[in-house]
């Protein structure tokens, strides 16, 4: 295995990890009711679903939009780190 093959494998693993995080965040954002977003004091459901959905779709665009993909990945991570726990706390018993 040469350096270029190793680099390709690392890039593929990073790409798949980022894609998985984005898809998980998008699907998770669809599971909560719109009222939960308002009760948690976060952006509304259509806004989060749009941001995360665009992030998932742009991962499949063949043109490398690295900066945009990076920003939307950060949005998915913010959703998972901040919004998802706030929404989940509303449903805990």
Image: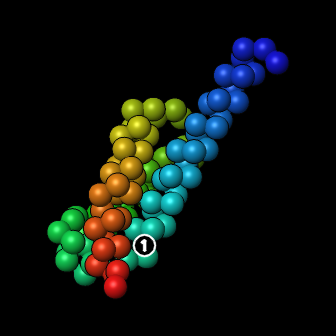
Circle 1 SS class? helix
**Where in the figure is residue 34, as x and y percent of width and height?**
29, 78
| Rendering coords of residue 87 (x, y %) | 31, 72
Q: Whole-percent x and y of residue 12? A: 65, 35
**Which residue reaches farthest top?**
3
> Of 90 and 70, which appears nearest the observer?
90
User: Which residue is more in the foreground, 70 or 2?
Assistant: 2
Q: Is residue 5 left or right of residue 76?
A: right
Please give the name of the residue rendered at 17% of the width and 69% of the height, measured from the top-left corner.
Answer: 41
Q: Position of residue 80 (x, y in %)?
A: 38, 57
Residue pointed to by mark 1: 30
Coloring scheme of the render? rainbow
Furthest-bottom residue in this view: 93
Q: 63 or 5, which lies in front?
A: 5
The quadrant where residue 46 appears = bottom left
Horizontally, residue 30 falls left or right of residue 60, namely left
Q: Residues within 10 Å of mark 1 (few under 14, many from 20)?
A: few
Decide if residue 20 is in sight here.
yes
Q: Residue furthest right?
A: 1
Q: Nearer the viewer, residue 15 or 60?
A: 15
On the picture, is 53 further left or further right than 78? right
Residue pictured at 45% horizontal, 60% vertical: 25
Q: Quadrant of residue 5?
A: top right
* Image quarter (top left, top right, bottom left or bottom right) of the C terminus: bottom left
Quarter of the N terminus within the rendering: top right
Residue occupying the point 58% across, 39% down: 15
């Amino acid at each position: 295995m040469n350096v270029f093959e190793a680099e390709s494998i690392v890039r593929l693993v990073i790409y798949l990890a980022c894609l998985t995080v984005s898809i998980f965040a998008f699907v998770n954002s669809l599971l909560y009711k719109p009222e939960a977003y308002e009760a948690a004091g976060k952006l509304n459901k259509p806004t989060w679903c749009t941001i995360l959905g665009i992030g998932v779709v742009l991962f499949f665009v063949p043109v490398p939009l690295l900066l945009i993909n990076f920003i939307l990945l950060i949005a998915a991570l913010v959703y998972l780190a901040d919004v998802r726990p706030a929404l989940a706390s509303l449903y805990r018993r």
